[in-house]
Structures are given as C-alpha cells and as structure tokens.
Amino acid sequence: MKKTYHGSCHCGKVRFQALIDLAEGTGKCNCSICMKSRGWGTIVKPADFTLLSGEEDLSRYQFGSFSAEHLFCRHCGVKSFGRGNVPEIGGAYVSVNVACLDDATLEELSTAPVNYMDGRNNNWFEAPAEVRYL
C-alpha cells in the first residue's frame, strides 16, 4: 500500500515527500555511478513526489545518455533523489534514495524487496551474477 514518506539530505536543506509503496520493490545497480554512490532507490511518478524545500540547494550531474539528472545537495553532498525520463521504464520518473526516507521504519526498510540491475553491462532488466557487494 502506498504511504507518504518524508525525506531529506543530511543537512536538511533539501526536503521532500513522496507517495511510495516500498513493498512494490526497490533497486540497486552495479553501473558506475550506483557503485560509487551505493545507490538504493525506488521509482515514483513525478505526480507522487513533492520537493518541499531546497531546489536552490541542488546541484546536478549528468553523464552518458543524459536521461537522468543525478541531483545532490551542494552543502552536504547527499543524493536524496534524482529524476529523468526513460521510455523503457514508463517515461518520466523520480528515483528516491530509500536511505533518505526519514520516517521509514527499520522493518519497512529491511523487508522492502530489492531488485538488482546489471547496469555495468547495459543489461538493466537482469540481475548481475553477484549482488552481495551491492
């Protein structure tokens, strides 16, 4: 069931709320940026995401296909969410960093299913052979 979660960066300048069903699954990937930032996300539609504060505190990084905006707080460096548009996954999206959900319980986090993606080999719909390091 969808629930409204509140989230933020480490310093609290960037704050958001999002309507998320963690039981629908979360994702971890082995692509170059997810590996280095230890990304753990869940995808929501833009209509289910509201940036409450900090738009002016966000910096943007893009690479590769430029289909994703990797956003981070320019003060503390935390990536609390990103956004993009990829037709293969349903178009416009917001990827919420699950670790930045301030009011998610430990039980919700520990029971949320994790889907693994082999972004390193551009095989996004398959899990890599090894996932323990993700």
Image (spheres, grey):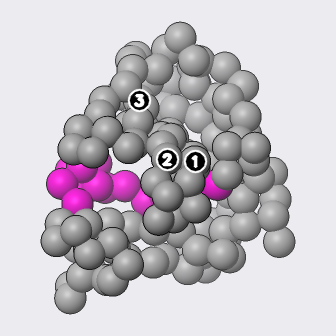
Residue annotated with mark 1 = 92
Amino acid on which the number 3 mark rests in the picture: Phe
Height in image: 52 above or below 50? above
Amino acid on which the number 2 mark rests in the picture: Asn
Query: For the point 31% across and 39% down, which residue is it?
Result: 66
Magenta part of the chain = 30-44
What quarter of the picture does the C terminus occupy? bottom left
Labels 2, 3: front one: 2
Q: Is 109 in the magenta?
A: no
- Secondary-structure class at tag 2: strand
- 85 displayed left or right of 106: left
Residue annotated with mark 3 = 72
- Could you tell which of marks 1 and 2 lies nearer the N-terminus? 2
- Count of number-bearing discs: 3
Whole-percent x, y for residue 53 in the image:
66, 20
Whole-percent x, y for residue 10 in the image:
49, 31
- Could you tell which of marks 2 and 3 lies nearer the N-terminus? 3
Query: For the point 59% across and 68% down, which residue is it?
Result: 109
| Residue 84 in view in this figure | yes
Whole-percent x, y for residue 1 in the image:
83, 71
Whole-percent x, y for residue 54 in the image:
59, 18
- 52 displayed left or right of 76: right
- Secondary-structure class at tag 1: strand
Pointers 1 and 2 in contact (CB under 8 A)? yes
Height in image: 5 above or below 61? below
Residue annotated with mark 2 = 85
What's the distance in space between the residues labelled 1 and 2, CA to CA? 4 Å
- Could you tell which of marks 1 and 3 lies nearer the N-terminus? 3
- Secondary-structure class at tag 3: strand
What's the distance in space between the residues labelled 1 and 3, CA to CA? 19 Å
- Mark 3 crowdedness (10 Å alpha carbons): few <14, some 14-19, many ≥20: many
Query: For the point 66% across and 75% down, which residue is it?
Result: 24
